[in-house]
Structures are given as C-alpha cells and as structure tokens.
Image (cartoon, rainbow, N blue to C red):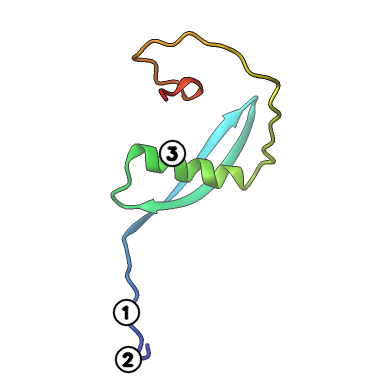
C-alpha cells in the first residue's frame, strides 16, 4: 500500500448461499451482507442477487381506488 494513500475503510461481511423454489424450479444464489445486517437488509441482498438470474419486467395496466385503514402498510396504498 502506498503510504501517501489514505487507508480504505472496511466492514465485516458474511457470505451467504441461499435459494428460492418457484413453480418447482430451484434457483441458487450467493450474496454478501454486512455481518450486522438486519433481516430486511438480508432479504434485499438476497433479492438483488436473485434479480441477476432473472429478467424482470412489468406493465402498468391502470389506476384504481382502494380503501385503506390507517394501519394499512401495503406498499400500494402508502399514506401521503
């Protein structure tokens, strides 16, 4: 390492191997996440790795009204 270069910051990561089984087909993925990652961060890292094995596309088919409770946390009806 060049002593004139600042030291790079590092973080501890854990390597994972996981899979998803969908319609009888198993897709294996490997990914890394910070050692202290939350469940949500692990899920996001897994899904990011999974997306590398798939073509993902979608089409908006229209808008609709949906009744919402104040406690509703569904992403399609977020509070404004």
Expressed as whole percent of the image width and height from the top left, the position of residue 48 reads 53, 45
How much space separates mark 3 and mark 1, taking CA atoms?
Answer: 31 Å
Expressed as whole percent of the image width and height from the top left, the position of residue 42 reads 40, 42
Give whichever of 69, 45 is nearer the camera: 69
Q: Secondary structure at mark 1?
A: loop
Give whichever of 39, 67 is nearer the camera: 67
Q: Is residue 5 left or right of residue 51?
A: left
How much space separates mark 1 and mark 2, taking CA atoms?
Answer: 9 Å
Q: Secondary structure at mark 3?
A: helix
From the viewer's perspective, is the residue at label 3 or at label 1 nearer?
Answer: 1
The answer to whether residue 17 is above or below residue 67 is below
Count residues near mark 2 (Cα–Cα under 10 Å), then give few for <14, some for 14-19, many for 20+: few
- Which residue occupies 64% across, 45% down? 53
Expressed as whole percent of the image width and height from the top left, the position of residue 33 reads 39, 51
Q: Which residue carries the number 1 mark?
A: 7
Give whichever of 31, 37 is nearer the camera: 37
Q: Which residue carries the number 3 mark?
A: 43
Give whichever of 37, 17 is nearer the camera: 37
Disc nearer the start of the sequence (3/1): 1
């Amino acid at each position: 390492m060049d002593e004139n270069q600042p030291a790079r910051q590092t973080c501890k990561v854990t390597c994972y191997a996981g899979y998803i089984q969908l319609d009888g087909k198993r897709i294996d993925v490997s990914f890394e996440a910070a050692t202290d990652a939350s469940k949500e961060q692990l899920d996001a890292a897994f899904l990011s790795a999974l997306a590398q094995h798939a073509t993902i596309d979608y089409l908006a088919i229209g808008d609709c009204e949906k009744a919402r409770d104040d406690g509703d946390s569904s992403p399609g009806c977020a509070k404004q």
